[in-house]
């Protein structure tokens, strides 16, 4: 390479303007990466909190699970899902439909009421007595958090 | 360099998907699958019934839902002492006290010790503001139907005749209570159901309020007629019937226990035996209808062996009514109410 060209290249390579341009570009890319990482981490944390954390999870499935256990006199599940305040009622809760044939849950749908500690359910439990059906409408239920888990805690307004 | 965020994002999503499954979620699916709603299992902590009780209700006796005419008005809490509006003058125990050859003391079991104790209960109830003109019904489908007492609130739907015309003053005293359905009755009711909020009528009762408390709050009775045991095949029957009696006494309400005509829990008749024992233990009135049922063809029962049979007309000048379940049952209840009125209510409200 001719000396003149070398000098020209050298000037190009080592000129402060060129160096600054490259440095700025690298810095911008690093900052973009850092920002992206922060956003990703924040998103991940939020998603984790929403999906895994008890504080903001949906208690409605727990209530539905409790109602199902009650209709089938499943005392083990009732015990697992009832709040400590109601523990004295476990046996009574398990007795609710004990020995009754033809117990069915119809059209059960439960939803947390505006982020409150109340889950509103619609639908009914039906029990068959000979040719006559006795109905037990599903109602509003109170839920509380214990150790990060939602628990069924009786009826609510 | 530009692919790094995407890779990190993928890693985070993978971690999120694999590690963040709530332990509750599979449990829901597991239990929902393992324990379908239609399955009825026997809990481990309760006594296993010897027989599955599924009484067949009588097709001819519909179970009326609470309606405008026969449901309680909410808000009638016992806050003030009610004064009887049509208390009759005290009378001697009426001479007529016989049904199908059985004398009144054979099936209306209210001895002196019971009268004395129930006078105390009635007085306690009056201090709580119980209405001496109201009685409540608490029980299963044997009484949760349109044939239990209801006709006595509708002139023209019954004829007492010369032998039982004395009961008109009893009908007048408790006017309105006969046709009232209330919230203390439900088809299929077990004794424990009296204390289980799920069995209480959510249209009338407060959240977590049990049936007996709700009925007392709404109707404010001085007497409660209790017919339980037909659906109870386990050992919990006696425990919760005793609790029912205790709760009534604590609330100043006279509990009247009725034995039943059926043998649905078994031929050993253990529930009726338990009812008699509880009445004796607590010194409360007993209407031993089981004994009267022995005088009736087919024990006064429908083919299901559980529910009472009977003609729709309640004409006590006709022989047929003394062969049927509902009519004899209702007449016996009038006799019991008359005994309580004369021996307890009138003496305590006029003294």
Image: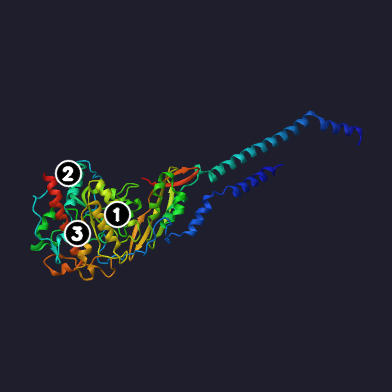
| Position in image of residue B345 (x %, y %) | 15, 49
Give the chain letter at badge 2. B
Of A87 and A34, nearer the camera is A87
Q: Under tag 2, what secondary structure? A: loop
Of B45 and B4, nearer the camera is B45
Judge the density around disc 1: few (<14), some (14-19), many (≥20) Cα neighbours within 10 Å. many
Spatial separation of the CA atoms under disc 2 and disc 3: 24 Å
**In the rendered structure, are the residues bearing label 2 and label 1 in contact, judged by CB atoms less than 8 Å apart?**
no
**In the rendered structure, are the residues bearing label 2 and label 3 in contact, judged by CB atoms less than 8 Å apart?**
no
- Classify residue B81 as left or right of residue A44: left
Figure check: B305 above or below A3: below
In the picture of the structure, the residue carrying the numbered disc 3 is: B149
| Position in image of residue B300 (x %, y %) | 22, 68
In the rendered image, the residue lying farthest to the top is A16
Spatial separation of the CA atoms under disc 3 and disc 1: 23 Å
Which of labels 2 and 1 is toward the front?
1
The answer to whether dots 2 and 3 both sit on one chain is yes
Which labelled disc corresponds to residue B82?
2
Which badge, 2 or 3, is on the more N-terminal residue?
2
Q: Under tag 1, what secondary structure? A: helix
Q: Quadrant of the C terminus of chain A?
A: top left
In the picture of the structure, the residue carrying the numbered disc 1 is: B241
At 82% from the left and 30% from the top, the residue drawn is: A14
Quadrant in which residue A108 is drawn:
bottom left
At 15% from the left and 44% from the top, the residue drawn is: B83
């Amino acid at each position: 390479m001719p000396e003149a060209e070398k000098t020209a290249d050298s000037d190009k390579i080592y000129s402060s303007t060129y160096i600054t341009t490259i440095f700025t570009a690298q810095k911008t890319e690093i900052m973009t990466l850092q920002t992206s990482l922060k956003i990703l981490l924040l998103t991940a944390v939020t998603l984790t909190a929403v999906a895994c954390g008890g504080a903001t999870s949906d208690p409605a499935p727990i209530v539905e699970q409790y109602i199902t256990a009650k209709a089938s006199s499943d005392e083990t599940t009732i015990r697992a899902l009832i709040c400590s305040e109601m523990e004295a009622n476990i046996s009574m809760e398990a007795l609710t439909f004990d020995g009754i044939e033809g117990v069915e849950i119809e059209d059960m749908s439960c939803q947390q009421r505006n982020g409150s500690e109340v889950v509103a359910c619609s639908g009914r439990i039906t029990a068959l007595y000979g040719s006559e059906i006795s109905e037990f409408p599903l109602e509003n239920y109170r839920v509380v958090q214990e150790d990060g888990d939602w628990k069924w805690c009786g009826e609510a307004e | 360099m530009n692919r790094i965020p995407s890779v990190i994002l993928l890693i985070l999503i993978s971690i999120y998907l694999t590690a963040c499954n709530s332990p509750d979620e599979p449990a829901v699916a597991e239990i929902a699958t393992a324990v379908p709603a239609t399955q009825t299992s026997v809990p481990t902590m309760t006594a296993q019934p010897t027989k599955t009780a599924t009484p067949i209700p009588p097709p001819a006796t519909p179970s009326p839902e609470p309606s405008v005419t026969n449901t309680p008005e909410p808000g009638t809490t016992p806050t003030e002492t009610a004064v009887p509006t049509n208390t009759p003058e005290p009378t001697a125990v009426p001479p007529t006290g016989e049904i199908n050859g059985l004398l009144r003391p054979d099936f209306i079991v209210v001895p002196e010790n019971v009268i004395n104790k129930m006078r105390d209960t009635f007085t306690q109830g009056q201090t709580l503001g119980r209405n001496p003109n109201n009685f409540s019904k608490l029980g299963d489908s044997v009484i949760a139907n349109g044939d239990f007492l209801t006709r006595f609130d509708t002139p023209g739907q019954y004829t007492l005749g010369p032998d039982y015309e004395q009961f008109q003053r009893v009908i007048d005293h408790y006017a309105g209570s006969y046709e009232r359905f209330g919230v203390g009755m439900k088809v299929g009711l077990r004794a424990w159901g009296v204390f289980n909020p799920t069995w209480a009528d959510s249209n009338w009762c407060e959240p977590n309020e049990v049936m007996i408390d709700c009925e007392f709050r709404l109707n404010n009775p001085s007497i409660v007629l209790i017919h339980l045991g037909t659906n109870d095949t386990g050992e919990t029957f006696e425990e919760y019937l005793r609790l029912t009696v205790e709760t009534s006494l604590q609330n100043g309400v006279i509990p009247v226990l009725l034995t039943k005509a059926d043998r649905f829990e078994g031929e050993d008749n253990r529930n009726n035996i338990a009812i008699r024992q509880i009445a004796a233990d607590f010194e409360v009135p007993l209407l031993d209808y089981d004994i009267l049922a022995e005088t009736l063809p087919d024990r006064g029962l429908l083919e299901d062996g559980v529910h009472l049979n009977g003609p729709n007309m309640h004409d006590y000048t006709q022989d047929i009514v003394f062969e049927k379940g509902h009519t004899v049952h209702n007449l016996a209840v009038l006799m019991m109410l008359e005994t309580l009125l004369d021996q307890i209510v009138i003496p305590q409200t006029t003294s």
